[in-house]
Amino acid sequence: MPIVVQKYGGTSVGTPERIQNVARRVLETHNAGSSLVVVVSAMSGVTDSLIKLARQVSGRPTDRELDVLLATGEQTTIALTAMAINAMGGKAISLTGAQAGIITDGIHTKAKIANVSPRQIRKHLSDGCICIVAGFQGQTLQGQITTLGRGGSDLTAIAIAAGLKAQNCEIYTDVDGVYTCDPRIVPNARKIEVIAYDEMLEMASSGSKVMQSRSVEFAKKFKVPFEVRSSFNTNRGTIVKEETPGLENVVVRGVSIERGQAKVTITNVPDKPGAASRIFTALAEAGVIIDVIVQNISTSGSTDISFTMNRDELEKMGQALDSVVKEIGAGKIVKQDGIAKLSVVGIGMRSHSGVAARLFEALGKGGVNIQMISTSEIKIAVIIEEAKIVEAANLAHEAFNLSQA
Amino acid sequence: MPIVVQKYGGTSVGTPERIQNVARRVLETHNAGSSLVVVVSAMSGVTDSLIKLARQVSGRPTDRELDVLLATGEQTTIALTAMAINAMGGKAISLTGAQAGIITDGIHTKAKIANVSPRQIRKHLSDGCICIVAGFQGQTLQGQITTLGRGGSDLTAIAIAAGLKAQNCEIYTDVDGVYTCDPRIVPNARKIEVIAYDEMLEMASSGSKVMQSRSVEFAKKFKVPFEVRSSFNTNRGTIVKEETPGLENVVVRGVSIERGQAKVTITNVPDKPGAASRIFTALAEAGVIIDVIVQNISTSGSTDISFTMNRDELEKMGQALDSVVKEIGAGKIVKQDGIAKLSVVGIGMRSHSGVAARLFEALGKGGVNIQMISTSEIKIAVIIEEAKIVEAANLAHEAFNLSQA
């Protein structure tokens, strides 16, 4: 019998009624003739309530204990989901991360999966049971409870699919799949049927937050194809898988945008070894996450360095750089808010030229001014004024004919 | 260093503030120079909420899944308690029942502790840590999560105290200890300093529900002395331990009452072997719990059999006995509501005579009519009209001078 792994996120199991809805879907798949492993998250809101509770007893809760606390969220969902399936005449068994054989390192609150030993799962599947597994959690070899950090339940599903060599891995969320662009911004955006891991990664890092990058990276590493689909309808979703020659025929797979950015320019940075290093080391130590970096060739012994980041990080950036800028003898820090990033992504770019030109032309004709440009092998990103992002997204989407399959 | 096991019930850890209060107490004991294991229950109300959630997804939740669900209650408390202690500068580690080495049989929702292997606890104690252990739960040898049923957290504490050969085991509740009678009924009731296991068992089975009988029986079996005390003050409580000659000098330790009882009489039961057996087998199969049973000597070939039970069981009793009474050729079922039981308890009774006489005399002088009498080696129980129970309790309390130490 083929093995199918399904994962349902917090919104999909957010109420007792939704859990019963998931139970019905699970039973349908099972009755259609599959061995089923179902990974569930904590009911939406539960994790936040637990963190709030922790803050009421401790200003800075111990990471180890935070994991013990948060793990109860998914444990609650697995029990309820199994009960719901059993009440509908199915045969389900719940398993915590530990019981399911998710072995992690000991870095509490952001543990990495070291190994999956799905002995228990295999046993229950061969007994004809549906296994309901707690996402987001595991245990160390010493039996300590750990959690995997953001997007951890997706990771659990993909790791189990890899461990069991499952035929299908289905990630159910509150969206239909991955779109050529956010349909709220580009009305004629189209659902993508198949996308390569690397494209999905670039889309994710460019703002299309259907899944955390680490889960996609994990799937890529272990060659686990998966499908992103909605738990609220029965539409096919988007399949994420290894590159194939067919996939490369499409030059641009999608347009991804990220709002709420800020641009910072350090003027007159002396053109000496180590200056840029000082700046970005200070930012890293302060925990400021930098996105695009641009530095032009120096002609006068000094140069300007620009970079972008989330707008919320501006203050931390200022604190980190004020003294550094003086020490290295640079000019001043110029901050610009109200910035956004637009990226066009596609593995076909590797073998097609003229993509950048087509993008720039479309934006130029539309009167969108490009402030910064950054490229990778399969992506072209531009930094523009945030007020123009909707217009720009529609222009780019049209320039590459993305509304047509 | 002496090992102390403390247990805090649901009310004692019912809010974040109360958890912090427990954390302070725990730290005081630890700083006074003890190795500490703290057993905690689910925050009051949490278990009921979880059961309510279960009922929303399933009419009859699977026992196995109910255990997985309910176990999250104590897991939440251990994490919060450990965090609170750590926030106050202590060094605490939480352990689930499974991690603490509580091994049980596989009877879900009412598992029996088969074994305690406190290897993890010993290791953490020797590291100078305070161990916070989830009460009420354990795991089978196959790694299934189980719960111990009502009063399970007391059981966990006593089992761990036995396993560690702890110097002290302190059961913290919302009462000060065990009293000579319920102070709400007998205003000059006095706290008992020391009580024997058997007395505690008779008091518990007679309505003084400070602890479940099974926990006391477990403590008796493994010779674990323990102290019942309040988590809301620092008063000494009541020590429960093995009998000593000194303990026997007191004839009556306390008076216990149980309201809400009902009396049933089956008239004209044929005086043949098997008749009583038919009646009580039918009641047992229907799950009706019978308390006192009285049958007089037969002089006419048939006899009356009377028994008492909780008032709420009357209907179930009727359903169970209607046909049986006809089959064995007995008369009719006479039900009487508004009944209560009063018991005087004391191991000293074994070597003192005249206790029954003194009790009956006191009740008789007070105009309290005795409907049934039942005795054990260390208890005399009488069934009386419920309306007279407060008067009767005060009369008995006075007759045995219980307000004086």
Image (tube, coloured by chain):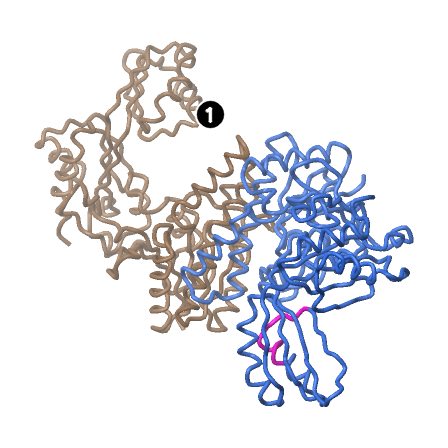
Chain colours: A brown, B blue
A7 lies left or right of B68: left
Horizontal and vertical percent position of residue A160: 45, 58
Q: Of A286 and B182, which appears nearest the observer?
A: B182
What residue lies at 56% left-to-right and 71% top-to-bottom?
B314
Horizontal and vertical percent position of residue A326: 40, 10
Residue B288 included in the magenta stretch of the image: yes
Q: To which chain does the residue with label 1 belong?
A: A
A106 lies left or right of A237: right
Residue A132 included in the magenta stretch of the image: no
Horizontal and vertical percent position of residue A251: 20, 47
Query: The disc labelled 1 sits on which kind of residue?
Result: Glu
B360 lies left or right of A110: right
Question: Which segment did they paint magenta?
Answer: B281-291
Q: Of A176 and B20, which appears nearest the observer?
A: B20
Q: How many marks?
A: 1
Q: Of B189 and A39, which appears nearest the observer?
A: B189
- The residue indicated by pointer 1 is A285
